[in-house]
Image (spheres, rainbow, N blue to C red):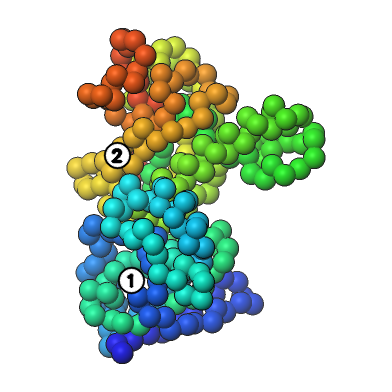
Amino acid sequence: MKHLKAKDSYMFDHSKKYDVKTMSIDEIVPASIYDEIPDRDELEKSITDGEMDFPLMLWPMTQDYWKKVHLNFYKRGNPTLPETAPEKDGQVLVVWRGRQRYQLAKEMGYTHIDCVIEKEQHKIVAMVQRNVIKMYEYRIHTLVDITDNGNLKKQFPFDTEAGHKITDKQTLSVARDQNSNFATMIQLLQMRGNITWDQPPRRIELPNLGNSSFGSYYEGAHTTWHFQFFTEQTGVYGDVSDPTGSLLDDFSLVPVVGDCHNTAHFPVQTFVTKELQGTDRQKVIGALAGGIINTYFSYAGPIDK
């Protein structure tokens, strides 16, 4: 047995210390797989004499959830993820924090590795925010209504976290559709790495889209949404010449709900991140005068968190 041990355990708060478990590396599965490990040189130096600084953090799920939900979003950018994930005591243990170390450990021939299990995903996100100082900032700009309304299981009438008033089944249905678009976006962004965010999507009324990168099909004033998010590693979504290039492929033609509070009408009810070609163009009703890109991305670079 070749065992990669952790020097320390994670502390989520001052009162809780996680129990470190030694797992067979064949009993766990990464949430996604890097084509190239972004921080290889730094991590190789940190793994010395069979030790790493911290254990991997695992999020447990059912095999059914892995197949029907996780792969539905992550398989596009990670074709080598297994259709059936390994199980431990009836659970699929998914590596959410420490995927680079997981891949590197496998390359280095380790058979066992120290892990901790966290059942609540929002705590994993908080762990990233607490322990990482340098982050990399990205932004998504879209005409799709990606409002995050939060918890909707309340009695009428009530206000959502985004400030929308829910008074009946119709307004509740719209809020659920908005949440669905937000959840789809988050799943797509996390296909290649963990992300964190400080604020929900911002809704901005633009008097003219002429100075933006939206398609020329959308003229005049429109409601837009802008979401700022952060990653631990550089190069997650592209290279130096095109830092967001992979996002264009990941989001391309993924279905959305188009009848929320958006003012733009979408010829195809999907995220559109690049000009359509070939048979895809045939899906567009009629001969459009301009491009129909409804979503684009920007990279703001490293920041000190």
| Residue at the (45%, 58%) spot, across then down | 66
Q: Secondary structure at mark 1?
A: helix
Residue 138, horizontal then vertical, whole percent = 38, 44
Say whether residue 38 is left or right of residue 304.
Answer: left
Q: Amino acid at mark 2?
A: Asp
Which quadrant of the figure has residue 214?
A: top left
Q: Residues within 10 Å of mark 1 (few under 14, many from 20)?
A: many
Mark 2, residues whose alpha carbon is within 10 Å: few (<14), some, or many (≥20)? some
Residue furthest out toward the left: 241
Residue 198 seen by the camera:
yes
Does residue 304 sit above or below 149 in this rendering?
Answer: below
Identify the residue shown where x is 48% and y is 62%.
Answer: 63
| Amino acid type at mark 1 | Tyr
Query: Is 88 left, or right, of 74 in this rendering?
Result: right
237 on left or right of 53: left
Quadrant occupied by the N terminus = bottom left
* Image x and y of residue 154, in percent: 76, 43
Res. 106 image quadrant: bottom left
Mark 2, secondary structure of its residue: helix
Q: Is residue 165 above or below residue 72?
A: above
How many marks can you see?
2
Q: Which residue is mark 1?
A: 102
Q: Quarter of the image for the C terminus: give it.
A: bottom left
Q: Which residue is mark 2?
A: 249
